[in-house]
Image: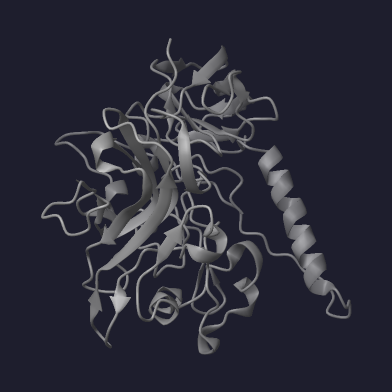
Amino acid sequence: MTPSNEFQTGGPHKQDLTSHVGPTALSMFVSTHYTGTEIDTFYKEGEAWKKVFGPVLIYLNSASSKDDDHRKILWNDAKRQLSEEIESWPYNFTRSEDFPHSQQRGQVNGQLLVQDRYMDKQLMQAKSAFVGLAPPGEADSWQKEGKGLPIWTQTDEIGRFNIKNVRPGVYNLYAWAHGFIGSYKLDLDITILPGNKIELNTLIYDPPRNGPTLWEIGIPDRTAAEFFIPEPYPQYVNSITNDGADKFRQYGLWDRYSDIYRDSDLVYTVGTSNYSKDWFFAHVPRKIGDDRCRPTTWQIKYNLQDVNNRGTYTLQMAIAAASFAEVEVQFNDPNSDRPHFTTKRIGYDNAVPRHGIHGLYRLYSIEVPGYRFRKGSNTIYLTQTRSDNSFEAVMYDYIRLEGPNSLHN
Protein backbone atom coordinates (compact mmCIF):
# COMPACT_ATOMS: atom_id res chain seq x y z
CA MET A 1 0.00 0.00 0.00
CA THR A 2 1.32 3.41 -1.03
CA PRO A 3 -0.49 6.15 0.93
CA SER A 4 1.30 8.98 -0.89
CA ASN A 5 2.88 9.37 -4.32
CA GLU A 6 5.16 12.22 -3.25
CA PHE A 7 8.31 10.13 -3.69
CA GLN A 8 7.35 8.62 -7.03
CA THR A 9 8.51 10.04 -10.33
CA GLY A 10 6.64 11.62 -13.21
CA GLY A 11 3.60 13.38 -11.75
CA PRO A 12 0.07 12.31 -10.83
CA HIS A 13 -0.54 10.15 -13.92
CA LYS A 14 2.78 8.34 -14.20
CA GLN A 15 2.00 4.69 -14.81
CA ASP A 16 4.16 1.84 -13.65
CA LEU A 17 4.16 -1.89 -13.28
CA THR A 18 2.20 -3.26 -10.32
CA SER A 19 2.54 -6.99 -10.96
CA HIS A 20 4.89 -9.53 -12.48
CA VAL A 21 4.71 -13.08 -13.77
CA GLY A 22 3.14 -15.26 -11.13
CA PRO A 23 1.62 -14.03 -7.85
CA THR A 24 4.10 -11.15 -7.58
CA ALA A 25 3.04 -7.64 -6.54
CA LEU A 26 5.36 -4.76 -7.36
CA SER A 27 5.90 -1.38 -5.75
CA MET A 28 8.18 0.48 -8.12
CA PHE A 29 9.72 3.74 -6.97
CA VAL A 30 11.77 4.64 -10.06
CA SER A 31 11.52 3.48 -13.67
CA THR A 32 11.39 4.68 -17.26
CA HIS A 33 8.18 2.73 -17.97
CA TYR A 34 5.65 4.75 -19.98
CA THR A 35 8.00 7.74 -20.18
CA GLY A 36 11.34 6.56 -21.53
CA THR A 37 14.83 7.80 -20.82
CA GLU A 38 13.63 11.40 -20.54
CA ILE A 39 12.80 10.72 -16.90
CA ASP A 40 16.28 9.39 -16.09
CA THR A 41 18.12 11.33 -13.42
CA PHE A 42 21.44 12.96 -14.24
CA TYR A 43 24.00 14.41 -11.84
CA LYS A 44 26.63 17.05 -12.25
CA GLU A 45 30.12 16.31 -11.09
CA GLY A 46 30.22 16.67 -7.32
CA GLU A 47 26.44 17.13 -7.04
CA ALA A 48 25.03 15.97 -3.72
CA TRP A 49 21.64 14.27 -3.90
CA LYS A 50 19.47 12.12 -1.70
CA LYS A 51 15.83 11.13 -1.68
CA VAL A 52 13.56 9.23 0.67
CA PHE A 53 11.40 6.52 -0.89
CA GLY A 54 8.38 5.32 1.04
CA PRO A 55 7.38 4.22 3.53
CA VAL A 56 5.00 1.72 1.95
CA LEU A 57 2.95 -0.92 3.77
CA ILE A 58 2.85 -4.61 3.01
CA TYR A 59 -0.56 -5.64 4.32
CA LEU A 60 -1.55 -9.27 4.72
CA ASN A 61 -5.16 -9.91 5.64
CA SER A 62 -7.31 -13.00 5.93
CA ALA A 63 -10.88 -14.21 5.59
CA SER A 64 -12.55 -17.56 6.01
CA SER A 65 -12.81 -19.59 2.83
CA LYS A 66 -16.19 -20.74 4.15
CA ASP A 67 -17.59 -17.34 3.29
CA ASP A 68 -18.99 -17.29 -0.23
CA ASP A 69 -17.82 -13.73 -0.74
CA HIS A 70 -14.41 -14.08 0.96
CA ARG A 71 -12.66 -12.36 -1.97
CA LYS A 72 -14.93 -9.34 -1.60
CA ILE A 73 -14.30 -9.32 2.15
CA LEU A 74 -10.53 -9.30 1.59
CA TRP A 75 -10.78 -6.54 -1.01
CA ASN A 76 -13.02 -4.29 1.08
CA ASP A 77 -10.78 -4.76 4.11
CA ALA A 78 -7.72 -3.83 2.05
CA LYS A 79 -9.45 -0.65 0.81
CA ARG A 80 -10.40 0.25 4.37
CA GLN A 81 -6.81 -0.19 5.49
CA LEU A 82 -5.51 1.95 2.64
CA SER A 83 -7.89 4.74 3.66
CA GLU A 84 -6.44 4.61 7.18
CA GLU A 85 -2.90 4.80 5.84
CA ILE A 86 -3.75 7.82 3.68
CA GLU A 87 -5.26 9.59 6.68
CA SER A 88 -2.09 8.83 8.69
CA TRP A 89 0.26 10.36 6.12
CA PRO A 90 2.88 11.62 6.72
CA TYR A 91 3.77 8.96 9.27
CA ASN A 92 5.15 10.15 12.60
CA PHE A 93 7.10 7.00 13.49
CA THR A 94 9.97 7.70 11.12
CA ARG A 95 13.21 8.94 12.66
CA SER A 96 15.09 10.07 9.58
CA GLU A 97 15.66 13.82 9.43
CA ASP A 98 15.01 13.52 5.69
CA PHE A 99 11.37 12.54 6.28
CA PRO A 100 9.62 15.55 7.88
CA HIS A 101 6.55 14.94 10.03
CA SER A 102 3.27 16.82 9.48
CA GLN A 103 4.15 19.74 11.78
CA GLN A 104 7.39 20.20 9.82
CA ARG A 105 5.57 20.62 6.53
CA GLY A 106 3.56 23.41 4.92
CA GLN A 107 0.56 23.84 2.67
CA VAL A 108 -0.57 25.93 -0.30
CA ASN A 109 -4.16 26.96 -1.00
CA GLY A 110 -5.80 28.76 -3.92
CA GLN A 111 -8.33 28.62 -6.71
CA LEU A 112 -7.74 27.85 -10.38
CA LEU A 113 -9.96 29.40 -13.05
CA VAL A 114 -9.74 29.07 -16.83
CA GLN A 115 -10.08 31.87 -19.36
CA ASP A 116 -10.95 30.89 -22.92
CA ARG A 117 -13.13 33.55 -24.52
CA TYR A 118 -13.93 31.33 -27.49
CA MET A 119 -15.57 28.83 -25.13
CA ASP A 120 -17.14 31.20 -22.60
CA LYS A 121 -16.96 34.95 -22.12
CA GLN A 122 -16.87 34.38 -18.37
CA LEU A 123 -14.09 32.78 -16.33
CA MET A 124 -14.63 29.03 -15.99
CA GLN A 125 -14.04 26.98 -12.87
CA ALA A 126 -11.29 24.40 -13.29
CA LYS A 127 -13.22 21.47 -11.85
CA SER A 128 -11.14 18.40 -10.89
CA ALA A 129 -7.97 19.96 -12.31
CA PHE A 130 -4.62 18.60 -11.20
CA VAL A 131 -2.52 21.11 -9.30
CA GLY A 132 0.92 20.37 -7.95
CA LEU A 133 4.20 21.65 -6.58
CA ALA A 134 7.39 20.39 -8.20
CA PRO A 135 10.97 21.61 -8.63
CA PRO A 136 11.28 24.77 -10.75
CA GLY A 137 11.24 24.19 -14.49
CA GLU A 138 9.22 24.58 -17.66
CA ALA A 139 5.44 24.16 -17.82
CA ASP A 140 5.53 20.39 -18.38
CA SER A 141 8.90 19.60 -16.79
CA TRP A 142 7.18 17.81 -13.89
CA GLN A 143 6.42 14.92 -16.28
CA LYS A 144 10.12 14.13 -16.41
CA GLU A 145 10.93 14.89 -12.79
CA GLY A 146 12.77 12.10 -11.01
CA LYS A 147 15.07 13.75 -8.48
CA GLY A 148 12.68 15.91 -6.48
CA LEU A 149 9.60 15.23 -4.36
CA PRO A 150 6.57 16.74 -6.12
CA ILE A 151 3.14 16.69 -4.50
CA TRP A 152 -0.23 16.90 -6.24
CA THR A 153 -3.91 17.34 -5.52
CA GLN A 154 -7.15 17.91 -7.43
CA THR A 155 -9.42 20.91 -7.33
CA ASP A 156 -12.99 20.81 -6.09
CA GLU A 157 -16.16 21.77 -7.95
CA ILE A 158 -15.23 25.47 -8.04
CA GLY A 159 -11.52 25.05 -8.68
CA ARG A 160 -10.33 25.42 -5.09
CA PHE A 161 -7.26 23.43 -4.11
CA ASN A 162 -5.40 22.64 -0.91
CA ILE A 163 -1.96 21.07 -1.27
CA LYS A 164 -1.18 19.63 2.15
CA ASN A 165 1.91 18.13 3.73
CA VAL A 166 4.43 19.85 1.47
CA ARG A 167 8.04 19.26 2.37
CA PRO A 168 10.17 22.38 2.93
CA GLY A 169 11.82 23.55 -0.27
CA VAL A 170 11.50 25.75 -3.33
CA TYR A 171 8.85 24.87 -5.90
CA ASN A 172 6.93 26.02 -8.93
CA LEU A 173 3.18 25.48 -9.09
CA TYR A 174 1.88 23.55 -12.12
CA ALA A 175 -1.60 22.56 -13.24
CA TRP A 176 -3.66 21.16 -16.07
CA ALA A 177 -7.41 20.88 -16.44
CA HIS A 178 -9.62 18.29 -18.10
CA GLY A 179 -11.20 19.75 -21.23
CA PHE A 180 -8.40 22.22 -21.97
CA ILE A 181 -5.14 21.77 -23.84
CA GLY A 182 -1.72 22.74 -22.54
CA SER A 183 -0.32 23.27 -19.08
CA TYR A 184 -0.34 26.02 -16.49
CA LYS A 185 2.71 27.24 -14.59
CA LEU A 186 2.73 30.02 -12.03
CA ASP A 187 5.72 32.26 -12.82
CA LEU A 188 6.74 32.50 -9.20
CA ASP A 189 9.02 30.46 -6.97
CA ILE A 190 7.18 29.23 -3.89
CA THR A 191 9.27 28.66 -0.78
CA ILE A 192 7.80 26.27 1.75
CA LEU A 193 8.98 26.54 5.36
CA PRO A 194 8.02 24.23 8.23
CA GLY A 195 4.49 24.95 9.42
CA ASN A 196 3.70 27.78 7.01
CA LYS A 197 0.49 28.20 5.06
CA ILE A 198 0.48 30.08 1.75
CA GLU A 199 -2.72 31.48 0.23
CA LEU A 200 -2.41 32.13 -3.51
CA ASN A 201 -5.99 33.34 -3.99
CA THR A 202 -7.17 33.13 -7.62
CA LEU A 203 -4.98 31.90 -10.46
CA ILE A 204 -6.05 32.27 -14.11
CA TYR A 205 -5.05 29.76 -16.76
CA ASP A 206 -5.17 30.90 -20.40
CA PRO A 207 -4.92 27.69 -22.44
CA PRO A 208 -3.37 27.87 -25.91
CA ARG A 209 -5.88 29.37 -28.29
CA ASN A 210 -5.43 31.45 -31.47
CA GLY A 211 -8.94 31.46 -32.92
CA PRO A 212 -12.40 29.90 -32.95
CA THR A 213 -12.85 26.13 -33.17
CA LEU A 214 -13.68 24.97 -36.68
CA TRP A 215 -13.70 21.30 -35.70
CA GLU A 216 -12.18 19.00 -33.10
CA ILE A 217 -11.43 15.31 -32.61
CA GLY A 218 -11.26 13.72 -29.17
CA ILE A 219 -11.29 15.03 -25.62
CA PRO A 220 -8.34 17.02 -24.21
CA ASP A 221 -7.58 14.80 -21.23
CA ARG A 222 -4.01 13.64 -22.00
CA THR A 223 -5.07 10.11 -22.90
CA ALA A 224 -6.31 8.24 -25.98
CA ALA A 225 -8.95 6.38 -23.98
CA GLU A 226 -11.91 7.93 -25.81
CA PHE A 227 -10.85 6.61 -29.22
CA PHE A 228 -11.68 3.28 -30.85
CA ILE A 229 -10.15 0.30 -29.08
CA PRO A 230 -10.66 -2.93 -31.04
CA GLU A 231 -11.53 -6.37 -29.76
CA PRO A 232 -8.40 -8.40 -28.99
CA TYR A 233 -7.42 -11.57 -30.79
CA PRO A 234 -9.34 -14.46 -29.18
CA GLN A 235 -6.17 -16.29 -28.16
CA TYR A 236 -4.94 -13.24 -26.21
CA VAL A 237 -8.11 -12.18 -24.40
CA ASN A 238 -7.65 -11.09 -20.80
CA SER A 239 -11.20 -11.30 -19.44
CA ILE A 240 -10.38 -9.10 -16.44
CA THR A 241 -9.67 -6.02 -18.56
CA ASN A 242 -11.75 -6.64 -21.69
CA ASP A 243 -14.62 -4.37 -20.68
CA GLY A 244 -14.96 -0.78 -19.58
CA ALA A 245 -12.21 1.70 -18.91
CA ASP A 246 -9.35 -0.83 -19.09
CA LYS A 247 -10.19 -2.38 -22.45
CA PHE A 248 -6.91 -1.13 -23.90
CA ARG A 249 -4.96 -3.46 -21.59
CA GLN A 250 -4.96 -6.35 -24.08
CA TYR A 251 -2.07 -7.93 -25.90
CA GLY A 252 -1.71 -7.47 -29.65
CA LEU A 253 -4.16 -4.61 -30.21
CA TRP A 254 -1.57 -2.79 -32.33
CA ASP A 255 -1.79 -5.46 -35.04
CA ARG A 256 -5.58 -5.11 -35.26
CA TYR A 257 -5.08 -1.88 -37.22
CA SER A 258 -3.82 -3.83 -40.22
CA ASP A 259 -6.79 -6.19 -39.96
CA ILE A 260 -9.40 -3.42 -39.77
CA TYR A 261 -7.77 -1.14 -42.38
CA ARG A 262 -6.72 -3.97 -44.65
CA ASP A 263 -6.67 -2.15 -47.99
CA SER A 264 -6.23 1.52 -47.08
CA ASP A 265 -5.48 3.73 -44.12
CA LEU A 266 -7.86 5.51 -41.78
CA VAL A 267 -10.03 8.30 -43.19
CA TYR A 268 -11.93 10.49 -40.74
CA THR A 269 -14.67 12.78 -42.05
CA VAL A 270 -15.55 15.68 -39.78
CA GLY A 271 -19.29 15.88 -39.20
CA THR A 272 -19.88 12.24 -40.20
CA SER A 273 -17.28 10.13 -38.42
CA ASN A 274 -17.37 9.39 -34.70
CA TYR A 275 -13.99 9.41 -32.95
CA SER A 276 -15.06 6.67 -30.52
CA LYS A 277 -15.70 4.34 -33.47
CA ASP A 278 -13.67 5.69 -36.38
CA TRP A 279 -10.38 6.93 -34.89
CA PHE A 280 -8.01 4.08 -33.99
CA PHE A 281 -6.48 4.62 -30.56
CA ALA A 282 -2.87 4.41 -31.79
CA HIS A 283 -1.29 5.62 -35.04
CA VAL A 284 0.82 2.54 -35.76
CA PRO A 285 2.64 1.31 -38.88
CA ARG A 286 0.95 -1.16 -41.21
CA LYS A 287 2.13 -4.73 -40.77
CA ILE A 288 2.95 -6.27 -44.17
CA GLY A 289 4.85 -9.36 -43.08
CA ASP A 290 6.12 -11.21 -40.05
CA ASP A 291 8.87 -8.67 -39.43
CA ARG A 292 8.03 -5.87 -41.85
CA CYS A 293 6.00 -2.70 -41.51
CA ARG A 294 5.40 0.42 -43.55
CA PRO A 295 4.36 3.99 -42.68
CA THR A 296 0.69 4.91 -42.51
CA THR A 297 -1.06 8.11 -43.54
CA TRP A 298 -4.34 9.09 -41.89
CA GLN A 299 -6.66 11.62 -43.51
CA ILE A 300 -8.96 14.16 -41.88
CA LYS A 301 -11.56 15.40 -44.38
CA TYR A 302 -13.61 18.51 -43.68
CA ASN A 303 -15.40 21.39 -45.35
CA LEU A 304 -14.82 25.12 -44.96
CA GLN A 305 -17.60 27.49 -45.97
CA ASP A 306 -15.27 30.47 -46.12
CA VAL A 307 -11.50 30.88 -46.19
CA ASN A 308 -9.47 33.90 -45.14
CA ASN A 309 -6.48 33.62 -47.44
CA ARG A 310 -4.62 36.33 -45.57
CA GLY A 311 -5.39 34.96 -42.12
CA THR A 312 -3.50 32.44 -40.02
CA TYR A 313 -5.13 29.18 -38.96
CA THR A 314 -3.87 26.93 -36.17
CA LEU A 315 -3.87 23.16 -35.88
CA GLN A 316 -3.65 22.22 -32.22
CA MET A 317 -2.27 18.68 -32.07
CA ALA A 318 -1.96 17.17 -28.60
CA ILE A 319 -0.16 13.84 -28.36
CA ALA A 320 -0.79 11.48 -25.48
CA ALA A 321 2.06 9.05 -26.18
CA ALA A 322 4.92 8.55 -28.61
CA SER A 323 7.60 5.95 -29.09
CA PHE A 324 10.38 6.45 -31.68
CA ALA A 325 7.73 8.10 -33.85
CA GLU A 326 7.46 11.03 -36.24
CA VAL A 327 4.27 12.70 -37.45
CA GLU A 328 4.39 14.69 -40.67
CA VAL A 329 1.47 17.01 -41.39
CA GLN A 330 0.35 18.08 -44.88
CA PHE A 331 -2.51 20.42 -45.76
CA ASN A 332 -4.30 19.48 -49.02
CA ASP A 333 -1.07 18.41 -50.72
CA PRO A 334 0.14 14.94 -49.74
CA ASN A 335 2.78 14.85 -52.49
CA SER A 336 4.80 17.98 -51.69
CA ASP A 337 8.53 17.47 -51.27
CA ARG A 338 8.50 18.69 -47.69
CA PRO A 339 5.78 18.38 -45.06
CA HIS A 340 4.21 21.56 -43.79
CA PHE A 341 5.14 20.42 -40.28
CA THR A 342 6.98 17.55 -38.65
CA THR A 343 7.33 16.58 -35.01
CA LYS A 344 10.67 15.00 -35.92
CA ARG A 345 11.42 11.84 -34.00
CA ILE A 346 9.77 11.90 -30.59
CA GLY A 347 9.17 9.68 -27.61
CA TYR A 348 10.52 6.67 -25.82
CA ASP A 349 7.51 5.76 -23.68
CA ASN A 350 6.66 2.37 -25.25
CA ALA A 351 3.02 2.77 -24.21
CA VAL A 352 1.70 0.58 -27.05
CA PRO A 353 3.43 -2.73 -26.18
CA ARG A 354 3.03 -2.06 -22.45
CA HIS A 355 -0.75 -1.85 -22.87
CA GLY A 356 -0.87 1.80 -21.83
CA ILE A 357 -3.15 4.57 -23.03
CA HIS A 358 -0.80 7.50 -22.52
CA GLY A 359 2.84 8.38 -21.94
CA LEU A 360 4.41 11.84 -21.96
CA TYR A 361 2.13 14.66 -23.10
CA ARG A 362 3.17 16.90 -25.97
CA LEU A 363 1.35 19.80 -27.59
CA TYR A 364 2.07 21.23 -31.03
CA SER A 365 0.44 24.51 -32.06
CA ILE A 366 0.93 24.52 -35.83
CA GLU A 367 0.31 27.83 -37.56
CA VAL A 368 -0.95 27.51 -41.12
CA PRO A 369 -1.30 30.37 -43.64
CA GLY A 370 -4.79 30.75 -45.03
CA TYR A 371 -3.75 30.21 -48.65
CA ARG A 372 -3.18 26.51 -47.87
CA PHE A 373 -6.93 26.06 -47.44
CA ARG A 374 -9.74 26.25 -49.96
CA LYS A 375 -13.44 26.85 -49.85
CA GLY A 376 -15.27 23.55 -49.71
CA SER A 377 -13.49 20.22 -49.32
CA ASN A 378 -10.12 20.08 -47.50
CA THR A 379 -7.91 17.26 -46.26
CA ILE A 380 -5.20 17.08 -43.62
CA TYR A 381 -2.73 14.22 -43.98
CA LEU A 382 -1.03 12.81 -40.89
CA THR A 383 1.83 10.44 -41.72
CA GLN A 384 3.54 8.38 -39.05
CA THR A 385 6.82 7.89 -40.91
CA ARG A 386 8.66 5.45 -38.65
CA SER A 387 8.09 1.77 -39.34
CA ASP A 388 10.99 -0.36 -38.15
CA ASN A 389 8.51 -2.26 -35.97
CA SER A 390 4.87 -2.22 -34.85
CA PHE A 391 5.65 -0.29 -31.68
CA GLU A 392 6.88 2.90 -33.35
CA ALA A 393 3.66 4.82 -32.88
CA VAL A 394 1.85 7.83 -31.46
CA MET A 395 -1.39 8.16 -29.57
CA TYR A 396 -3.28 11.37 -30.14
CA ASP A 397 -4.97 13.08 -27.24
CA TYR A 398 -6.89 15.74 -29.14
CA ILE A 399 -6.80 17.60 -32.46
CA ARG A 400 -8.44 20.96 -33.15
CA LEU A 401 -8.43 23.29 -36.15
CA GLU A 402 -8.80 26.95 -35.24
CA GLY A 403 -9.72 29.76 -37.59
CA PRO A 404 -8.03 33.18 -37.64
CA ASN A 405 -8.41 35.32 -34.54
CA SER A 406 -11.83 36.98 -34.53
CA LEU A 407 -11.64 38.60 -31.09
CA HIS A 408 -10.27 42.10 -30.66
CA ASN A 409 -9.12 43.61 -27.38
Residue 390 percent across, percent down from the top left: 31, 73
Q: Is residue 390 among what the camera can see?
A: yes
The answer to whether residue 177 is left or right of residue 49 is right
The residue furthest right is 67
Viewer-nearest residue: 314 or 248: 314
The answer to whether residue 194 is left or right of residue 139 is right
User: Looking at the image, which residue is at 67% across and 42% down?
Assistant: 86
Q: Which corner quadrant of the image does residue 128 belong to?
A: top right
The residue furthest left is 337
Q: Is residue 249 above or below residue 159?
A: below
Q: Is residue 146 among what the camera can see?
A: no
Q: Is residue 183 above or below residue 222?
A: above
Viewer-nearest residue: 68 or 97: 68
The answer to whether residue 18 is left or right of residue 265 is right
Residue 216 percent across, percent down from the top left: 48, 45
User: Looking at the image, which residue is at 64% across and 32% down?
Assistant: 127
User: Looking at the image, which residue is at 49% across and 30% down?
Assistant: 175
Quadrant including the N terminus:
bottom right
Count of numbered marks: 0
Residue 218 percent across, percent down from the top left: 51, 50
User: Looking at the image, which residue is at 40% across and 62% down?
Assistant: 351
Q: Is residue 37 above or below residue 128?
A: below
Name the colour scheme.
Answer: one colour
Q: Which corner quadrant of the image does residue 114 belong to?
A: top right
Quadrant including the C terminus:
top left
Q: Which corner quadrant of the image does residue 314 belong to?
A: top left
Residue 393 percent across, percent down from the top left: 32, 63
